[in-house]
Image (cartoon, rainbow, N blue to C red):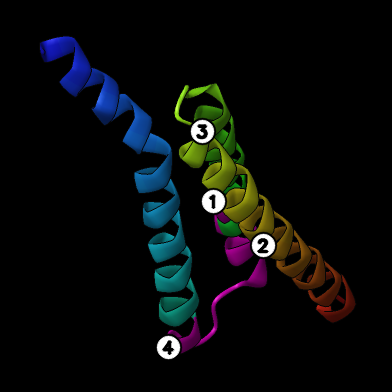
Amino acid sequence: MRSEIQGNRSEGKPVILTGVLVVAALLIFFIASTIKNVNLSVGIVLYSLIDFGFLVAMILGIKTKNKPIVIFSVIVNGILFLTLLAMIYLMAIANGISEP
């Protein structure tokens, strides 16, 4: 009985991690937009860490035995990873253009 409960908890970790990372990305976005004179490289570093977290969540999701969690993890984390990667790339271009 105890091993089933622990197994269910470990299978839910990728989904919970994905939710936490989405909330963290939204918080960084809204907090950075309200604070004046924030360096753009701070956002690039923070979003890069969150992007790495999406990769970790995808790998954890693929390692589970539950088929719906694997499918959810690959699709959702893949979309979020690529979207955030594109945003980081655009922020890096903007940072390069604005530097003297």
Q: Are marks 1 and 3 in contact (CB under 8 Å)?
A: no
First in sequence, mark 2 or 1: give its number: 1
Residue marked by disc 2: 84
Callouts 4 and 2 close, C-beta under 8 Å: no
**Number of residues whose C-alpha sits closer than 10 Å to that of mark 4, classed few (under 14), some (14–19) or many (20 or more):** few
Residue 60 position in % (x across, y down):
50, 29
Q: Which of the marked residues, 4 or 1, is nearer the chain's N terminus? A: 4
Q: Which amino acid does label 3 sit on?
A: Lys
Front-lying residue, 25 or 33 = 25
Query: Which mark, residue 67?
Result: 3
Q: Is the magenta stretch mostly helix, strand or loop?
A: helix
The mark nearer the N terminus, 3 or 4, is: 4
Q: Are marks 4 and 1 in contact (CB under 8 Å)?
A: no
Using residue 56 as the reference point, say whether residue 12 is left or right of it. Answer: left
Q: Quadrant of residue 2?
A: top left
Q: Name the residue under label 4.
A: 34
Q: Give the range drawn in magenta.
A: 33-46
Mark before the other along the chain sequence, 1 or 3: 1
- Asked where in the image residue 40 lies, by quadrant, the reply is bottom right
Q: Is mark 4 on a helix, strand or loop?
A: helix
21 magenta-colored: no
Kind of residue indicated by mark 4: Thr
Q: Position of residue 84 (x, y in %)?
A: 67, 62
Q: Indicate yes or no whether the magenta region holds residue 41.
A: yes
Residue type marked 2:
Leu
Query: Residue 92: image x %, image y %?
Result: 79, 66
- Please tell me whether mark 4 or mark 2 is closer to you in this view: 2
In what quadrant of the picture does the N terminus appear? top left
Alpha carbon separation for disc pair 4 and 1: 20 Å
User: Dot 3 lies on which element?
Assistant: helix
Q: Are marks 2 and 1 in contact (CB under 8 Å)?
A: yes
Q: Give the labeled residue for mark 1.
A: 50
